[in-house]
Image (tube, rainbow, N blue to C red):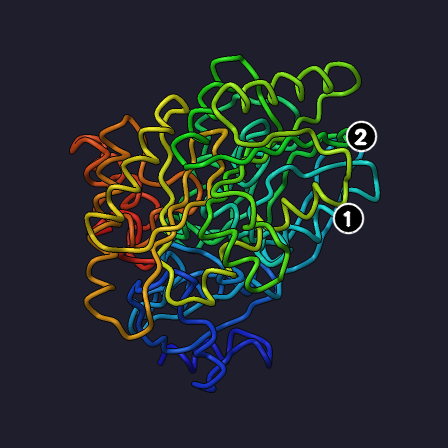
Amino acid sequence: MLIDDLRQELPDGRMVEDPGVAAGFVHDEAEWAPYGTPLVVVRPRTALEVRAVVRACMRHGVPLVTRGAGTGLSGGANAVEGCVVLSTEAMDTIHEIDPVERLAVVGPGVVNDDLRAACAEQGLWYPPDPASAPWSTIGGNVATNAGGLCCVKYGVTRDYVLGLEMVTGTGELVRLGRRTAKGVAGYDLAGLMVGSEGTLGVITEVTVRLRPRREAERTVAGYFSSVVAAGRAVAAIGAAGLTPSALELIDRHCLAAVDKWKNMGLSVDADVVLLGRTDAPGPAGAQEAERMLACFEEAGATWAAQSTDQEEADALFSARRLAYPALERLGPVLTEDVCVPKAAVPEMLARIERAATRHDTLIANIAHAGDGNLHPLLITQPGDTAARERAQAAFHDIIADAIDLGGTVTGEHGVGLLKRDGLERELTPAVLEMHRAVKAALDPHGILNPGKVIAGG
């Protein structure tokens, strides 16, 4: 029996068999994504313990679902019926920070902000910064190829993963990638693992690239009368050749929800706030801030200014990070994550508004607007089945519109369960078969997070 095998293979305290405790490990934050009841939850502390779990699942033909902190928004970490859930949260050691090579070696359970704080002590910086950074883990960030507020300039998680240690779907413990600044030998298997959502292996260690600590940022804020007007400012910044270190959009629904929760007074004067930042040093930064401000004004901002108060500027960005939990207080939130070309941002925002009207659904908007990554948040009332069905219809329309505008179904949250149909629309049949071939080669027993990302995978 699988549980007997696990008891023999794992030290005491690694298995969670109490159903009440295990219930906290069965799903992520994706509203309405289905999940099952696991046979057992395991919390290994070493790579060898992970390997033992994978091999036990292979022997018994039992599915294995890996999860980090459970902050995902696509259902990628949801349990399937009768599976083993493997939580990496206890693998939370920062093994090394090398200031010469500018890299860090960490366990998958290390919290994003904890790594950033440890790096800052040595004058270094780990750029990927999802809004969940205070809680999400590096392993989960790697699994979904997470982005964040500064990825408009600095890229997403894949741009910082140098190497990985992982257990394959055949139970082998292997190392992929490198520690060197450059390296092109063989296929980029480490890069392939980033964004694979636990379907190709179980990550047990991550080596990430670091940057020097950056200059203090300048913040430009603009108020707009509509999301479409704010979208025109985003397009204007791209057309001007500017690369802000952040460019974030928050609409009136988000501002009101944050105000109601935290009493920040942000929704009094604006329907939409656009927040831009530049971290260019010295005069170049001042010039970039001025040009960004001009783009805001030319696009029709009702008010725009460069912030001279760092505390005020930080409060505005705090509101951006608080928007999602603030909206959750209003009712179930179905979160979108589409990405379109920057020039298409105004049209995509207009289509989201039309979808809200067409399906009689409240849709709030936050966005990493600078790189076209939009997060429409579809809000319903608890227990309202008809509202849920309308919201799901709007969700699918938004995906179709993003693809129609040359975009993609997910910019950073992953495919998981919620976006499988969208991925099938986005990719050609030949490319879908390539995905399935990779899955079959690396997980020949079909035990790793089955049913996620690729339908039938």
Q: In the image, what residue occupies the spot 46% across and 48% down?
A: 252
The location of residue 336, given as percent across then percent down, is 36, 48
Residue in the foreground of this view, choosing between 277 and 309: 309
In the picture as drawn, the residue positioned furthest to the left comes out as: 429
The location of residue 96, given as percent across then percent down, is 75, 46
Within 10 angstroms of label 2, few (less than 14), some, or many (20 or more) residues? few
Q: Is residue 20 above or below residue 361?
A: below
Say the numbered circle drawn on residue 100. Answer: 2
Q: Judge from the rendering whether residue 31 lies leftward or rightward of residue 116; answer left or right.
A: left
Q: In the image, what residue occupies the spot 60% across and 43% down?
A: 129
Mark 1, secondary structure of its residue: helix
Evaluate whether residue 160 shows in this view.
no
Residue in the foreground of this view, choosing between 271 and 309: 271
Q: Judge from the rendering whether residue 336 lies leftward or rightward of residue 288; answer left or right.
A: left
Q: Could you tell me how far apart the alpha carbons at marks 2 and 1 are, in whole angstroms?
A: 15 Å
Provide the residue designation for mark 1: 118
In the rendered structure, which amino acid carries the disc numbered 1? Ala
In the rendered structure, which amino acid carries the disc numbered 2? Val
The location of residue 246, given as percent across then percent down, is 59, 32
Q: In the image, what residue occupies the spot 42% across and 30% down?
A: 229
Residue in the foreground of this view, choosing between 425 and 13: 425
**Of marks 2 and 1, which one's residue comes earlier in the chain?**
2
Q: In the image, what residue occupies the spot 56% across and 53% down?
A: 132
